[in-house]
Image (tube, rainbow, N blue to C red):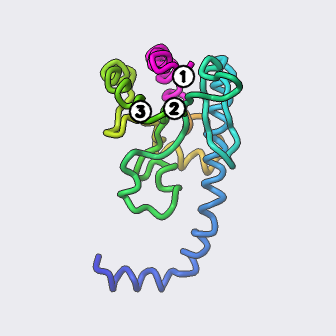
Amino acid sequence: MSSPELDRLIVENILDLDSAANRVEPIEMRIWAAHAEAMESWSQDCGWVGEFDTDGDLIARPEAWETDGEKQAWFGLGFGANDDELDLYFELVQLTGAKGNVCLWFGYKGLRNPWKAVARQHAEALREFGFVMTPYGDFYTPCSPDLTQMVEAVESGDFRAATDPVRAALDRGKAAEPVFTAILKQLGAI
């Protein structure tokens, strides 16, 4: 569709577009809240701790990854490694699985250079658990929802099936915990 045709459609439907744009943020907040609830419930069931406030980070971790009252490492919910390049306007696009990715990222508090060197040594082992290493030495595992399930969840208010990918990613994180813990011990972080 050419730009003039698209521009015409936008102008003709501007009231509907304005109404839709005003609904996007509340829907995004509902989805973030569903992810927070899924992560908190999963963490409680598995004996992990975390931060589950949608105004901050959504993170989960084993208690052993804390020293002197400070978290040294965690798994946090975020978007895909290359999603910035997609030039998406609404987070809702990623949160629904329409385009881009939702990912569970491994986060580490320590210095980047020692981390990268040690992380590269363990990349193959972590790949077996479904974790991808970026060129910067960061690890993530995808957990994007199925668009159809998310559409149904937004309509019904029941987000259980739509947040199953987040729980599955946390399961992969728990399975990979010994490898991540070995890295943290090698670096003297824990």
Residue 124: x and y in percent read: 30, 21
Dot 1 lies on which element? loop
Q: How many marks?
A: 3
Counting residues from the start of the chain, the first of labels 2 and 3 encountered is 2
The prevailing secondary structure element of the residues shown in magenta is: helix
| Mark 1–mark 3 distance (CA, rounded to whole Å) | 17 Å
User: Which residue is under mark 3?
Assistant: 139
Which amino acid does the dot numbered 2 rest on?
Gly
Q: Is residue 39 magenta?
A: no
Label 3 near label 2: C-beta < 8 Å? no
- Name the quadrant of the C terminus: top right
- Find residue 106 and name its label: none
Above or below, 97 relative to 50: below
Dot 3 lies on which element? strand
Label 1 near label 2: C-beta < 8 Å? yes
Task: Out of 24 and 47, give the one closest to the viewer.
Answer: 47
Residue 61: x and y in percent read: 60, 25
Dot 2 lies on which element? loop
Q: For residue 117, what is the image quadrant?
A: top left
Graded by Cα atoms within 10 Å as few (under 14), some (14 to 19) or many (20 or more), the crowding at tag 2 reads some
- Name the quadrant of the N terminus: bottom left
User: Which residue is under mark 1?
Assistant: 189
Which amino acid does the dot numbered 3 rest on?
Phe
User: Which residue is under mark 2?
Assistant: 110
